[in-house]
Image: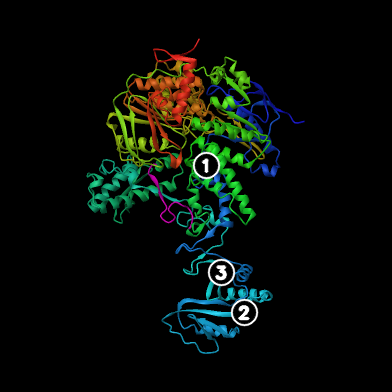
């Protein structure tokens, strides 16, 4: 009998301290605990990694060579493990060709549906186009003209000029006797004179017969002959009417031929269906004058942004100015159009140019290339990721003018089903498309295959609606989705796959989800469980924990203070405990709600007519010097308002060199009251193992500068670059500063072994001989933030940055810890600490995107203290948030909605949390009212603005 539990023995991955645990199979299991306590190490780096490794090892050696094989996690043994599937917060794809429809496989079913049941229309005249086989034409004749006498004709000339003597001669030779010329039947044995300057139509009379049951063979032969002569067309003339039928998709009026309708025709990733202009991307990426030029500055003053700091380009421009009389000191916007075109696209005028090689300056005759061609050439030739990323700032995407963003060629768009083409259906919100499918589910459908496809479509669309992404469209690019959206989409895909006997591991699926939709998501998780799967969820959401069959709490602290199993059991058992999770599940919230400010500041930031994406021209008033929450269901327009409109709009006003195009809006008023705007979003802090908290926050630069000023370093002539592990000089060249080497094991996973030269320190021996208080630069990277703070407490430039990491609750992480090992919550707080360490001096607007991601409620309380401290220092904070602890502790709430997608983008309500609760408009107000009711039942607000539990 197979084991009913997953048994883990002595898991030691990352900070786990020999965790031994039994987890019930085929249950919904939540792993919770403080950020950095080891939840992901247990769920993903141990359980998922071992499940995936065992599955791959069960394959043949031939199959294994094509698969990425994971190394064995640091654990003694795991029993009862199933094949594992991971659904993490990471984006679904960075490929611009990947869409919601392709990721969920719904688009594949749609392509099949259109290929099998779609009706093609002429792209020019819009009339339906049909094709028939010989048997279908014969059946149609007997169905419509039974017993009648008819003619079968083959159109050999259609509305063309000429005498066509050779056509008539060829027909005589084949034995035909009659032709119809311009509607008149003539004998071929007679001479047929035609005016060569007029258009004529010629049809061969292939056969004349009565439609009798015993003549089906003769009828089929006549139709077959006519189709061959008429190049796929046949005319059936009977009862005074005519039908032109074809065995190909060709419009008889416009003579436009359509390709055979097959699924590939509707794929923008296949040359058969992709728009020939944009190759199926729907847009063109190019360098833009708007992004690369500051029109208010002169050329000499730096108007051409990419040329700044490049003296050789300034030299070329000065030489060019002499030849074409270009004013380098006039604002760019005041230059004549012809001169602006020269600056952008170059000139054929030859002039003396210089280049330096090996310390020698040479001169040659050349021409000025132009800003935009130079950018394109530089971008195409560079091998540096950093350079390419820098140049990306000047690139923009414009909709393809040929396909208008549909990605498909006209022939594909001319096919319709349910009165719409495939692009029109994929442009609908998933929820709306789902309703259309349900309406047509019981339509009489001839083909059983099509019936099955529609059933499958209905199921998969319903799963997307269930997990709370019904506002998305199927054509939405996957690389524009948030981590939470991409995770829920993959969850819906897995529900649709109907696998059983699998272990699913999910990372905070409630991220970005309004409390209204949490119940739907929990239902989806239970659906996966009920298919005999084990669902393991790393989660902090109270509703998800209460719905779980089993809970495991990892802690008690973070980093080296965590890594242990604090408590485990069913939710009812947890309610009775006094661990961090127990009081949370009982509803005992401590210190989360502060008393509201008596009066809000009068200073306001006014956004007028915001209309980007689904925003409906809304006017939004944001109190400054306050903590303001932007709320609403998923897809209601929060990110469009905060990032596309507000952030980009303010950056344009505050920074003359910022060129990103803001989202559509009329104006932003009150921006003069701000000095800076800072954005802290959910993007990762680094994509390589070389990225770490020290390099990201900039504290490592200050530490390297300190080491370069030490007496020993000065004596040896070491600059700060000597202490970088990313450049030659001070790093260990045997491992390139990585501290480890990769050993290829062919069919086994690559093994990373400690570098035998530097022994994992990353630096060469000479660099490590320079020490500060007995610590080499490698020793410093191995220190935790708390330990480094003790070492550098007397050096304000370093201590200040470390202090903000401590205040963000990250004192336990190591300075040199790889960014790839940081949890989502840790990475978010590292970014926040970096922003807080910048000396803006008040009057800064901080924009945060769900900063509670990955945080347990004690971590949320710490985050709230940081945010309120920012406000007290004269700053303003606007954050997108679904966490009710933060929403109800804010000064002001702006709620968008009422729904997502096309049904969102409006202002539902705004005011203090209690004002929203009293008015009760929308889902957020209901959630606030419920939260405050629970809070007041379990605690009360003290005069100092904090809360305490009821005794």
Residue wearing tag 1? 93
Observer-side mark, 1 or 2, equals: 2
Q: Whole-percent x and y of residue 923? A: 46, 31
Q: Element under label 3?
A: strand
Image quarter in which the N terminus is found? top right
Q: Element under label 2?
A: strand
User: Considering only vertical position in the picture, is 818 above or below 479?
Assistant: above
Q: Whole-percent x and y of residue 202? A: 50, 79
Front-most of 45 and 459? 459
CB contact under 8 Å: marks 1 and 2: no
Report if residue 498 is visible in the image.
yes
Determine crowd level at label 3: few under 14, some 14-19, many 20+ residues with C-alpha closer than 10 A.
many
Choose the circle earlier in sequence order: 1 or 2: 1
Q: Whole-percent x and y of residue 816? A: 50, 26
**Label 3 to label 1, Cα distance in Å?**
44 Å
First to last magenta residue range: 393-409
Q: Element under label 1?
A: loop
Determine crowd level at label 2: few under 14, some 14-19, many 20+ residues with C-alpha closer than 10 A.
some
Choose the circle earlier in sequence order: 3 or 2: 2
The kind of secondary structure the magenta stretch mainly shows is: loop
Report if residue 759 is visible in the image.
no
Residue wearing tag 2? 209
Residue wearing tag 3? 246
Determine crowd level at label 1: few under 14, some 14-19, many 20+ residues with C-alpha closer than 10 A.
some
* Quadrant assignment, res 139: bottom right
Q: Whole-percent x and y of residue 562? A: 57, 19
User: Considering only vertical position in the picture, is 422 above or below 255?
Assistant: above
């Amino acid at each position: 009998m197979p084991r009913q539990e997953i048994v883990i023995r002595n898991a030691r991955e990352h900070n786990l301290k020999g965790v031994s645990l039994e987890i019930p199979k085929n249950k919904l299991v939540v792993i919770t605990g403080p950020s950095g306590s080891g939840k992901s190490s247990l769920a993903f780096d141990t359980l998922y990694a071992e499940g995936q490794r065992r599955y791959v090892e069960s394959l043949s050696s031939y199959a294994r060579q094509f698969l990425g094989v994971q190394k064995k996690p640091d654990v003694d043994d795991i029993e009862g493990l199933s094949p594992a599937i991971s659904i993490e917060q990471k984006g679904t794809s960075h490929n611009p060709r990947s869409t919601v429809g392709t990721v969920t496989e719904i688009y594949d079913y749609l392509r099949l549906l259109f290929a099998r049941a779609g009706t093609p229309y002429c792209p020019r005249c819009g009339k339906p186009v049909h094709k028939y086989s010989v048997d279908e034409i014969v059946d149609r004749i007997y169905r419509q003209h039974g017993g009648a006498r008819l003619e079968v004709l083959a159109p050999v000339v259609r509305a063309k000029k000429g005498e066509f003597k050779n056509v008539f001669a060829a027909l005589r030779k084949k034995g035909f006797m009659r032709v119809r010329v311009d509607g008149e039947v003539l004998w071929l044995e007679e001479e047929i004179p035609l005016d060569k300057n007029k258009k004529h139509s010629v049809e061969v009379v292939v056969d004349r017969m009565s439609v009798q049951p015993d003549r089906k063979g003769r009828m089929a032969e006549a139709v077959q002959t006519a189709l061959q002569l008429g190049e796929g067309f046949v005319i059936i003339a009977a009862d005074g009417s005519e039908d032109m039928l074809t065995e190909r998709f060709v419009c008889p009026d416009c003579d436009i031929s359509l390709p055979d309708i097959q699924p590939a025709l509707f794929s923008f990733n296949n040359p058969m269906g992709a728009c020939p202009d944009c190759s199926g991307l729907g847009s063109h990426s190019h360098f833009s004058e708007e992004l690369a030029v500051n029109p208010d500055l002169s050329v000499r003053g730096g108007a051409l942004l990419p040329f700044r700091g490049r003296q050789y380009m300034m030299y070329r421009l000065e030489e060019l100015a002499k030849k074409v009389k270009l004013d380098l000191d006039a604002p760019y916007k005041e230059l004549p159009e012809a001169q602006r075109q020269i600056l952008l696209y170059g000139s054929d005028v030859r002039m003396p140019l210089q280049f330096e090689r090996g310390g020698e300056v040479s001169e040659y005759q050349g021409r000025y290339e132009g800003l935009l061609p130079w950018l394109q050439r530089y971008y195409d030739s560079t091998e540096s990721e950093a350079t390419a990323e820098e140049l990306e700032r000047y690139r923009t995407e414009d909709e393809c003018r040929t396909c208008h963003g549909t990605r498909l060629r006209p022939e594909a768009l001319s096919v319709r089903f349910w009165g719409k083409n495939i692009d029109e259906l994929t442009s609908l919100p998933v929820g709306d498309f789902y309703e259309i499918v349900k309406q047509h589910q019981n339509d009489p459908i001839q083909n059983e295959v099509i019936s099955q496809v529609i059933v499958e479509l209905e199921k998969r669309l319903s799963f997307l609606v269930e997990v709370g992404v019904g506002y998305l469209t199927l054509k939405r690019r996957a690389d524009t989705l948030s981590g939470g959206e991409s995770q829920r989409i993959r969850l819906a895909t897995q529900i649709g796959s109907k696998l059983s006997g699998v272990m699913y591991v999910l990372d905070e699926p409630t991220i970005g989800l309004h409390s209204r939709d949490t119940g739907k998501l929990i239902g989806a998780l239970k659906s996966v469980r009920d298919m005999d799967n084990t669902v393991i969820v790393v989660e902090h959401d109270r509703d998800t924990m209460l719905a779980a069959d089993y809970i495991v709490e990892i802690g008690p602290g973070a980093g080296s203070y965590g890594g242990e199993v604090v408590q485990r059991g069913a939710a009812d058992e947890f309610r009775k405990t006094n661990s961090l999770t127990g009081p949370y599940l009982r509803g005992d919230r401590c210190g989360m709600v502060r008393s509201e400010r008596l009066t809000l500041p009068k200073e306001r930031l006014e956004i007028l007519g915001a209309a980007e994406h689904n925003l409906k021209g809304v006017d939004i008033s944001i109190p400054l010097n306050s903590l303001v929450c932007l709320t609403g269901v998923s897809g209601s327009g929060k990110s469009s308002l905060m990032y596309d409109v507000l952030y980009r709009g303010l950056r344009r006003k505050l920074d003359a060199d910022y060129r990103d195009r803001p989202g559509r809006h009329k104006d932003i008023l009150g921006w003069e009251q701000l000095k800076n705007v800072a954005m802290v979003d959910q993007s990762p802090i680094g994509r390589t193992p070389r990225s770490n908290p020290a390099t990201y926050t900039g504290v490592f630069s200050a530490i390297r500068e300190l080491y370069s000023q030490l007496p020993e370093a000065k004596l040896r002539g070491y600059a700060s670059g000597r202490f970088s592990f990313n450049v030659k000089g001070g790093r260990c060249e045997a491992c390139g500063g990585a501290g480890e080497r990769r050993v290829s094991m062919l069919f086994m996973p690559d093994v990373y072994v400690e570098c035998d030269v530097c022994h994992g320190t990353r630096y060469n021996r000479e660099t490590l001989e320079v020490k500060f208080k007995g610590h080499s630069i490698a020793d410093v990277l191995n220190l935790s933030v708390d330990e480094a703070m003790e070492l550098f407490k007397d050096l304000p430039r370093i201590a200040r940055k470390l202090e903000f990491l401590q205040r963000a609750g990250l004192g336990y992480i190591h300075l040199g810890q790889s960014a790839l090992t940081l949890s989502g919550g840790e990475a978010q707080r590292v970014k926040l600490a970096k922003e807080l360490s910048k000396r803006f001096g008040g009057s800064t607007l901080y924009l945060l995107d769900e900063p509670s991601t990955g945080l347990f409620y004690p971590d949320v309380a710490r985050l709230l203290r940081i945010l309120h401290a920012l406000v007290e220092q004269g700053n303003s904070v606007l954050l997108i948030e679904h966490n009710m602890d933060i929403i109800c502790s804010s000064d002001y709430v702006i709620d968008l909605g009422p729904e997502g997608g096309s049904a969102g983008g409006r202002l539902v309500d705004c005011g203090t949390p209690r004002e929203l609760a009293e008015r009760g408009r929308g889902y957020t107000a209901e959630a606030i009212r419920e939260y405050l009711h629970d809070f007041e039942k379990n605690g009360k607000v003290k005069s100092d603005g904090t809360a305490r539990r009821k005794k």
